[in-house]
Image (cartoon, rainbow, N blue to C red):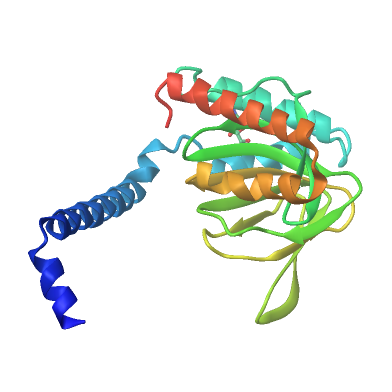
Amino acid sequence: MAATKTKRDADPESKSSLTTWVARISALFLFFSLCSVLDGIKSRWYVFDPTSLHELAQAAIAHAPAPDDTAFMVDYIIKNLTSTYPSTQIALNHDTSEWVFNNAGGAMGAMYIIHASITEYLIVFGTPIGTEGHSGIHTADDYFNILVGEQWAFSPPNLQMERYPAGSVHHLPRGQVKQYKMHEGCFALEYARGWIPLMLPFGFADSLSSTLDYKTLYHTVRVTGREIIRNLLIFKI
Ligand SMILES: *[C@@H]1O[C@H](CO)[C@@H](O)[C@H](O)[C@H]1NC(C)=O
């Protein structure tokens, strides 16, 4: 054993492999340092803020002719966002008919992607018939502004049901996990801020492993990619 070791140490090849490993470990260290720096400054790329989106969701509910008029609320939200944020600052998807199914964490609903970039997304997500599932473990803070219906949530050791009616906001901090249920019809304006690309695998996993609905998957990737690129083109990270 010892003899082999001595022989190896003398070998110039093992010296170069040591250099390779030092280089690899340094690269890894640099990569994690870069990630940590970027994580520290990510907030400078945020355009939306949770408080004004919550106010906007509440205003959309207040102006709706009926409490279940989701289409009206979506229009109201888009009109407001379009006049609030210049198109040079942030790109929004104005096509309110562009809904795609979404299966994630065992829950199923549909979503309309209003905005997607590297550090933020804003969607309307919901279903008129109810669903239940896993929230996912996310690298972003998630603000679920209930527009129509009610969302329930559960997170032990609190054994009571959390209840989020229309007009309220359910904040799921980065890294936390809950079971949630849209008991009956429920739609929400969902705002996430953090590292959005790292959230996408959760959004795709159910399609790849369960539904095999590649048409929906294709449209989800197409719309998300298109919106992220539209934002990158105006330097919205
Ligand atoms: C958008 O909605 C917010 C919240 O209700 C409101 O304060 C703001 O004035 C609205 N902006 C426009 C341009 O309608």
Residue visible at 12% across and 58% down? 15
Q: Position of residue 111 (x, y in %)?
A: 74, 37
- Taking 234 as reference, is 85 left or right? right
Q: Quadrant of the N terminus?
A: bottom left
Q: Quadrant of ligand 1?
A: top right
Left/right of residue 67 with respect to residue 40 in the rendered view: right
Front residue of 17 and 180:
17
Residue positioned 49% across, 24% down in the render: 231
Q: Position of residue 157 (x, y in %)?
A: 65, 82
Image quadrant occupied by the C terminus: top left
Q: Which residue does the image show at 22% across and 57% down from the upper left?
A: 21
In this view, the residue in front, 197 or 92, is 197
Q: Quadrant of residue 101?
A: top right
Q: In the rendered view, does 17 fall on the left or right side of 126?
A: left
Q: Is residue 58 above or below residue 64?
A: below
Image location of residue 156, percent across then percent down: 67, 78
Of 207 and 19, nearer the camera is 19
Q: Position of residue 42 (x, y in %)?
A: 37, 44
Res. 34 visible in picture: yes
Reply above or below: 95 against 213: above
Identity of the residue drawn at 51% across and 39% down: 120
